[in-house]
Amino acid sequence: MTNVDVHEFWALPVCCNVKDSFIEDFSFVDEHVSSIFSISYKDNITLKFRDFVDSNEFNLKLFDNKISFKGQIPLVLYSCNLDYLLKAEKSVLFNLRVGDVSNSYSSGFTKKESQTCNVLNACYEFSDYNSVSDDFILVKIFFDSENLIIDANVDNISFLKFFISENFGVSKDKIKINSLNNYWSSSIFPISFNAILQGIVISKKINKRVNVVYYKRHFGILDNLNLTFSVSNCLLADNKLSKIVLEIIINRPLNFLYKFYFKFINNVFKNLFFDGFLEIFFVENKSDFIFFYDNLLAFETSVYNFIYSNFYNLALSISCEPIGYLLTQIKGDYSSFFKIFKKLDIKNSLIKKSSVLSVNKDYNIFDTSRRGVGFAYLNSNTYFLNEDQYVVAFLYKDELNVFLPYSIIDNNLSNYLKNSLAKTLGLTYSSINFLIDESVLNSANFYNLLFKDPYLIEKAILSIKDNFSSLMDADFANEYPVIVKEKIAISDINDCVLGCSVELKFEFYSLSAVFSNATFFVEQGKFSKLKLNNKRIRTIFGLAVDYVFCRANVSCDIKDCLSLEFVEDGEFVFSFRSVFIVSVSAIRTALIQVFDFNASSTPLDFEEILNSWSIKIDIN
């Protein structure tokens, strides 16, 4: 990035990393202070959100001096010179008043007795995984004579246009958003969303082009957000789970998305394999700060992780073998679960862990190891998809533009589809462009924007490829562009039912983890229909390992043993989302069996884990 002329300005956010504090004032000292300007909480910029369920309106602040999240941004500096901004950012001083410390929860099981059942309490915390590989993101904003032009790697374009139009008085058809598909654009959307809003405010104020740049140090609000599941398990005399009282502490403002997430988690529990009464309470951060959290994949991963981690911890607390304990909880009519268990080698789950002496890592002791087997099961449906979506392709002589409803989060799939299209059409890989389309946004289809499973796009693109191939075989008249539109019909979307079993050997002193015999059990499918190679499923499993261990200095090795087993014939649904979720859940449960206690945080906090151990002798 380079500095530009005075007709183009740079904008740079400034973070405050003191959570639960209030900014009384701020200042910065710089030799170029006369050339540096700012927008901040002092400008009291309030924007309007509308709830798509009941049309309630929320007035939210672009900046807030109440710092509810580490990494929150209370001001943005702007100037015609980026170097000036980088120096000024370092000199910003906040005059802070520290607020109340937030509640903390114990991570271990606490047993309580009641008149009717044995109550075991526990806590689990899940943080988002920021997988952005680039060192910065850049958003460009400018107004020409009629249009607002935005260059940014984003999806949810229809929502962006709707929101910008309502708050900045620009007609939706005058808003042009240029976005190339990028597999991390979905996870980074809250950052890009705020960058776009900040850029528009500055551009309108100074009537110039604005480049808003966020470096990785400005992504802190993503890295420090988490979901905490505080649970009370009510066990009957036979240790059957009769009731779960679940309090979900959401360390982020959900605002108008609150209803969706509440509805979503209730649906997940309705489709689970065990009976039992569930009470859910949401404890939401009530910040008025704008934060559009649309990472459904991270939320769903956290929910399933909680479910299986909780079952494994319950089993260990009552001295049961975890998978055997799971079997005692299954509904009598839950046939799909039993189908998968018939394929699972239960003997593998009964691995006797070697005798071990483990102490704090600060001591110079010989290496020790333990083994565990993790298991997770997922029955994923698309109940909240209520409107068909489309993939549209425009073929030109030397280029193909494919418009997608959302970004493809599976990078291997994106590369495979581009290579397949290029080969069929005789084009270069670089001439295949995946772009983000916009749909008409209304109350009926808003939640569709949150569901982003790449396998739906895969099916549509492969159909488009076949249509182009047929046209070329028919010797079409070379009249460009050739347009092919493929519908993603909701009625054609099948549930994804699969389980995952994985063995883990963990060596404590050297901090190394070896994964073996990772098997995915799919309810329906055939290898003859499988558009898949081992690299693709290995990559997803590898991403799951990265997520669990990304904060731990652990050496991980995945043996070349990944396999798929089909329980019965049928159409195979290869869902990145589902495979990732069951992989993470199986890895976490294997670790629980290894540790013999609840490693409450995901990603793992190994300082917490190792420091909580004293001497532990396993006599099995």
Image: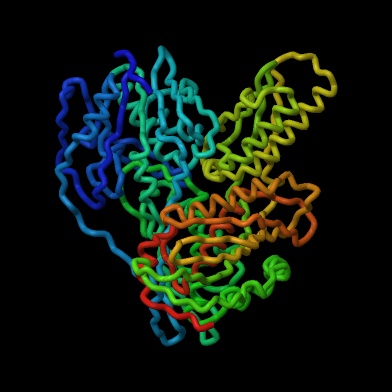
| Picture quadrant where residue 559 is located | bottom right
Which corner quadrant of the image does residue 71 belong to? Answer: top left
Q: Position of residue 373 (x, y in %)?
A: 58, 69
Task: In the displayed orientation, state which residue is furthest to the right.
Answer: 474
From the viewer's perspective, tell me whether residue 194 is left or right of residue 327.
left
Count every numbered label the image shows and give the total. Answer: 0
Is 254 drawn above or below residue 230 in the view shown? Answer: above
Q: Nearer the viewer, residue 33 or 303?
A: 33
- Type of colouring: rainbow
Where residue 530 appears, as percent x and y from the top left, is 75, 47
Q: Residue at x 42, y 74 (%)?
A: 358
Q: Is residue 469 above or below residue 119?
A: above
- Is residue 511 rendered to the left or right of residue 426? left
What percent of the width, then of the height, locates residue 275?
A: 58, 73
Look at the image and tell me in which quarter the C terminus lies: bottom right
User: Horizontally, is 578 left or right of 442 in the view?
Assistant: right
Q: Position of residue 294 (x, y in %)?
A: 47, 45
The residue depicted at 55 percent of the width and 32 percent of the height is: 181
Foreground: 41 or 278? Answer: 41
Residue 242 in view in this figure:
no
Residue 469: tell me if it is visible.
Answer: yes
The vertical placement of 544 against 155, above or below, is below
Q: Quadrant of the N terminus?
A: top left
Residue at horizontal 69%, vertical 71%?
345
**In percent of the image, x 41 and y 32: which residue is there?**
137
